[in-house]
Image (spheres, helix red, strand yellow):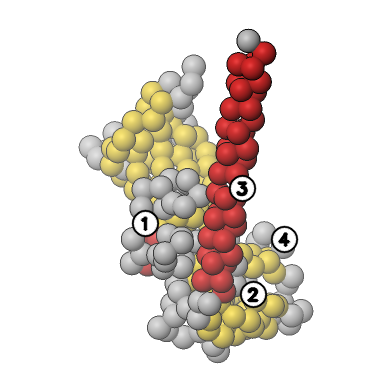
Amino acid sequence: MEQENADGKMAKKKRLLIGLAVLCLLGCVLYAVKIISNKQLEAWSVLPIEGTIVILNENAEIIPFLPTELRCFSVLAPGFFHSVSEREPKIRMDESGQFQGKMPESPTTLLFNTEDGKYAAIVDVMPNGQTTGLVIELRLRYTVTGRLVDDTGTPLTNHIIKLGTVRNYRDFGVRVPPIDRQGHSHTGVTLHSERTTTDSEGFFTIDNMIPGNEYKVFAHQAESHESRIRTATLEMPILHPEQYREPFSLGDVSTQCGGTIRFLQ
């Protein structure tokens, strides 16, 4: 009996040692893959990027430069160890509004936003286009009003509505698997979004719109555990000076019905 117990303990110890060896080997393999992947990312070609920020008021007049923040989004084409990756270009900006640095040789979107939140611009920079000598015009954000309706013109009351400036990987010709290497199911990034709720007649008001940018509209019934998503696309115009005196009217925003979303009760 004692011999059997000793043999059992020995067998258990061997299985434990084998398990630890397998885990160590797996850890070494994953570490090597990570190193190779990082080397691959470092090997991506880069392009110089350089330009000047110009800030325009509601009268389209240049005003003194204001402290400005920069957010970047870059798409890397699929590779062996990664599918799509957001990579931060190394761009420096001085106190006069001059910026320069390097960006991956892939489509890149730049979001410029003054620290006071009043002026902004979103610019796509393509590797086969101009990347130096850029002049980025930041324009005054503005407020919009509208009425959310369905495809028959019926007002959609008590709907939560979100306007977002979205960049999808497929917009740049990059194919994306349903699940990326980090296990995320996203296919792009929202650079700016605002939300509100329609009133009893379907009207809404949203602040901080960035001129000259396309916004996706996403809407669904508020206070509902199951609701159909409604979508539309809007282009925010660059306003004339007199149009800044009051909120800009989008008129009726006609939406199309999409999928269903369910909320936890």
| Residue 150 in sight in this render | no
| Residue 120 screen position, x and y as percent | 59, 65
| Residue 127 in sight in this render | yes
- Residue located beneath label 1 in the image: 176
Judge the density around disc 4: few (<14), some (14-19), many (≥20) Cα neighbours within 10 Å: few
- Residue located beneath label 2 in the image: 90
| Residue at mark 3 to residue at mark 2: CA–CA distance | 36 Å
Question: Contact, CB < 8 Å: mark 3 with mark 1?
Answer: no
- Residue located beneath label 4 in the image: 116
**Which residue occupies 63% across, 27% down?**
10
Which of labels 2 and 4 is toward the front? 2
**Which residue occupies 65% across, 76% down?**
91
Judge the density around disc 2: few (<14), some (14-19), many (≥20) Cα neighbours within 10 Å: few
Q: Amino acid at mark 1?
A: Val
Which of labels 4 and 3 is toward the front? 3
Q: Amino acid at mark 3?
A: Cys
- Residue located beneath label 3 in the image: 24
Instruction: Answer with mark 1 or mark 2, whichever residue precedes in sequence.
Output: 2
